[in-house]
Image (tube, rainbow, N blue to C red):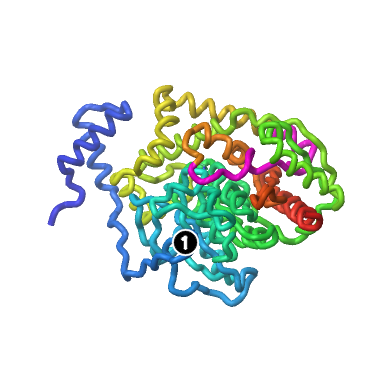
């Protein structure tokens, strides 16, 4: 028998490296004592093993929206608010016995467990169909880059489905499922919803637990529903929101309360049309959203113009998001501090993916900001964060005058397939969405009109944890848009 506490040469070398890297140099004898101390307190760390060989089968759907699916929708309860509703989960959310890929050929795990959000959907009676295709590691706004193939927009194959929750958007728009969960770090629920002409909700940051999710940028990441109407989206959000001990960040979140009661009552609310989200949009997008927003007066909502400078929040987002992802790579996929939870199956899969290499798409996306951050010893990250704080202060000031904001979700029309290649193409797509990940506020997108068959969507933003207000205004817009369209 070998003594588990006896130091090997590799242990001695690792301790020497750690000490040197952290500038904690001590005499050799002291380091040997510290190493013995460490080994004496090491927990038993056997890697997780899986029994059973279920992994689902690859779906065969017309739009390449789904990946691994069960043979039959998995239903665990006959009671609850979601009975009869079918759901798909973006492939960075763990669903037991279905292979998870994060849209990347480098990542693969078949979790033995369900993400908290999946457990909650099942408890409310939903039927889980399977996993939805996505951009690799949730990076990319168009849905063209999954290692498992391009996701087609069911409305019009010449348009992108939007990303990164591209399969979630396409599966709901096509009617393959009633609802999907996506994840939104810079716009990835709202952008595919806007491209596919459906409703998408990015909840307040930390309202919805992320245990069982593969983090991208923990200070920005959220999980939210895509559905064909606001009421269904609100019902799903109500089911998945609220504290979970396994995700320490949600401990500070409130109980969600009810998001569906009073949904139809927007009477007396004040809505602001913020200046730069309109002025930076095309005249067509700005004009269409303004016209529908003005009709809110008919349901008792006051509509006013308000100043709000988004500044270059999309650039700040790229810096923050990429730096946090790089940090996760460096940290073997563990957020030390407040992250989304500590599941060993997902952590080990993340580490293995890193060792295989995440590929050119991810490299092009994260290395430029990571390089600038490293070259400045973290100053670019700190500056982006300070810019974010200044933005939140401007937003607070705006919210002292109005209950919610309405603006175009996309600054321009839905992009055509193949036209988004450079950073300059990419930034405007996230220009109106990413700022609200920085601010952590709720943001709901819904289609309000169309131009030549292409949906035009509005985004409703409310103060953090006022998700019910954002949903009420979205529901009011849905009513006025459909009543006079
Ligand atoms: N598409 C954006 C990006 O690539 C947003 C990503 C996201 O929200 N996951 O950064």
* The image quarter in which residue 363 lies: top left
Image: 263 above or below 366: below
Q: Position of residue 294 (x, y in %)?
A: 82, 44
Q: Position of residue 417 (x, y in %)?
A: 51, 46
> In the picture, which quadrant includes the N terminus?
bottom left
Q: Residue at x 49, y 56 (%)?
A: 90
Q: Residue at x 64, y 60 (%)?
A: 228
Instruction: Answer with left or right where residue 379 lies relative to residue 484.
Output: left
* The image quarter in which residue 70 lies: bottom left
Outermost residue, top direction? Answer: 376
- Magenta range is 395-418
> In the picture, which quadrant includes the C terminus?
bottom right
- Report whether residue 123 is seen: no
Confirm whether the magenta stretch covers residue 414: yes
Q: Position of residue 161 (x, y in %)?
A: 54, 51
* The image quarter in which residue 273 lies: top right
Confirm whether the magenta stretch covers residue 474: no
Q: Which residue is mark 1?
A: 66
Q: Position of residue 335 (x, y in %)?
A: 43, 44
């Amino acid at each position: 028998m070998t003594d588990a506490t006896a130091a090997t040469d590799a242990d001695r070398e690792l301790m020497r490296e750690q000490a040197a890297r952290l500038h904690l140099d001590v005499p050799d004898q002291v380091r040997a004592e510290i190493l013995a101390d460490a080994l004496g307190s090491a927990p038993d760390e056997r890697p997780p093993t899986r029994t059973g060989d279920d992994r689902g089968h690859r779906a065969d759907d017309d739009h390449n929206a789904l990946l691994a699916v069960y043979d039959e929708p998995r239903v665990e309860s006959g009671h609850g608010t979601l009975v009869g509703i079918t759901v798909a989960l973006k492939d960075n959310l763990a669903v037991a016995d279905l292979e998870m890929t994060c849209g990347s050929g480098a990542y693969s795990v078949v979790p033995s467990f369900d993400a908290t959000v999946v457990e909650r959907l099942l408890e409310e009676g939903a039927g889980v169909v399977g996993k939805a295709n996505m951009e690799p590691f949730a990076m990319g706004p168009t849905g063209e880059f999954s290692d498992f193939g391009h996701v087609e927009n069911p409305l019009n194959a010449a348009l992108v489905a939007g990303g990164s929750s591209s399969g979630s958007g396409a599966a709901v728009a096509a009617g393959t499922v009633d609802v999907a969960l996506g994840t939104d770090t810079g716009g990835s629920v709202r952008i595919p919803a806007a491209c596919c002409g459906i409703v998408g909700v990015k909840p307040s940051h930390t309202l919805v637990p992320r245990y069982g999710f593969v983090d991208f940028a923990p200070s920005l990441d959220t999980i939210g529903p895509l559905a064909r109407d606001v009421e269904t989206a609100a019902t799903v959000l109500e089911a998945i929101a609220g504290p979970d001990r396994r995700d320490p960040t949600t401990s500070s979140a409130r109980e969600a309360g009810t998001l569906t009661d009073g949904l139809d009552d927007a009477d007396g609310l004040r809505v602001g049309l913020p200046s730069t989200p309109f002025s930076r949009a095309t005249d067509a997008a700005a004009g269409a959203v303004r016209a529908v927003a003005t009709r809110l007066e008919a349901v008792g909502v006051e509509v006013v113009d308000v100043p709000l400078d988004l500044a270059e929040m999309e650039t700040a987002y790229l810096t923050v998001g990429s730096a946090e992802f790089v940090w996760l790579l460096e940290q073997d996929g563990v957020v030390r501090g407040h992250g989304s939870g500590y599941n060993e199956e997902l952590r080990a899969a993340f580490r293995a993916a890193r060792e295989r290499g995440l590929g050119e798409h991810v490299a092009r996306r994260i290395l430029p900001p990571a390089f600038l951050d490293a070259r400045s010893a973290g100053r670019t990250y700190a500056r982006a964060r300070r810019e974010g704080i200044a933005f939140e202060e401007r937003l607070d000031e705006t919210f002292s005058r109005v209950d919610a904001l309405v603006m175009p979700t996309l600054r321009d029309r839905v992009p055509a397939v193949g036209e988004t290649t450079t950073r300059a193409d990419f930034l405007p797509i996230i220009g109106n969405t990413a700022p609200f990940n920085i601010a952590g506020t709720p943001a709901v997108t819904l289609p309000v009109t169309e131009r030549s068959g292409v949906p035009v969507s509005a985004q409703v933003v409310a103060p953090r944890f006022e998700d019910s207000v954002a949903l009420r205004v979205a529901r009011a817009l849905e009513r006025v848009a459909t009543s006079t369209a």
